[in-house]
């Protein structure tokens, strides 16, 4: 359950159903997090989602990692993990920073484009629940 205080800040409960979005296209991965997800990441150091495919389950996670300086990602055992420098992610909920971006070097000279962003409300009307998304700056007057 998402609750808004009088100051319109979002809190979360442990059983809150997550809506973290992931987009993969070629050698590019983008995660978009709602307000409560960014808060959870900042406070607990991790957020994880699963998608079930019959007998198989795909996992994706964003976690704060103290030993890195830029975004990194790994894939193993049906799970993508995007790692965020702990120094950047710890206060992300309280900052105006929209997101983080990095080109991770891969073997054989290839690169993996990584992008982690706050999820803003869409400019057009969408059928999905956007109540926990960040207000879109383009809609601000």
Image (cartoon, helix red, strand yellow):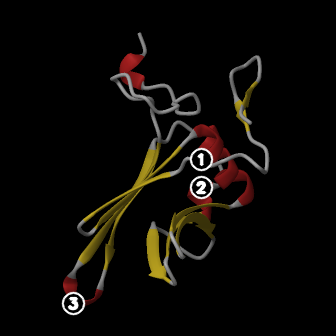
Decide if residue 122 is on the left or right side of residue 42: left
Specify the label residue 30 is tagged with.
none
Residue 34 location (% of width, % of height): 55, 41
Q: Residue at x 68, y 21 (%)?
A: 8
Placement of 112 over or under 4, stated as above or below: below
- Which class describes the residues within 10 Å of circle 1: few (<14), some (14-19), or many (20+)? some
Q: CA distance from mark 1 to mark 3?
A: 33 Å
Specify the label residue 108 is tagged with.
3
Instruction: Please give the residue where the numbered disc 1 appears in the rendered image.
Output: 92
Earlier-in-chain disc, 1 versus 3: 1
Earlier-in-chain disc, 3 versus 2: 2
- Choose mark 1 or mark 3, whichever is in front: 3
Q: Residue at x 59, y 55 (%)?
A: 89
- Which class describes the residues within 10 Å of circle 2: few (<14), some (14-19), or many (20+)? many
Specify the label residue 89 is tagged with.
2
Residue 26 location (% of width, % of height): 23, 67
Q: Choose between 128 and 46: the one closer to the eye.
A: 128
Q: Choose between 6 and 2: the one closer to the eye.
A: 2
Residue 29 location (% of width, % of height): 35, 62
Circle 3: element type: helix
């Amino acid at each position: 359950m998402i609750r808004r205080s009088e100051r319109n800040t979002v809190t979360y409960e442990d059983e809150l159903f997550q809506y973290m979005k992931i987009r993969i296209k070629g050698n590019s991965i983008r995660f978009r997090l709602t307000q409560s997800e960014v808060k959870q990441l900042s406070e607990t150091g991790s957020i994880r989602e699963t998608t079930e495919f019959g007998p198989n389950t795909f996992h994706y996670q964003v976690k704060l990692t103290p030993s890195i300086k830029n975004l990194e990602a790994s894939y193993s055992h049906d799970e993508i993990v995007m790692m965020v420098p702990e120094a950047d992610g710890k206060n992300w909920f309280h900052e105006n920073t929209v997101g983080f971006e990095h080109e991770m070097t891969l073997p054989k000279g290839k690169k993996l484009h990584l992008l982690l962003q706050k999820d803003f409300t869409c400019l057009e009307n969408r059928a999905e629940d956007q109540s926990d998304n960040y207000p879109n700056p383009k809609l601000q007057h």
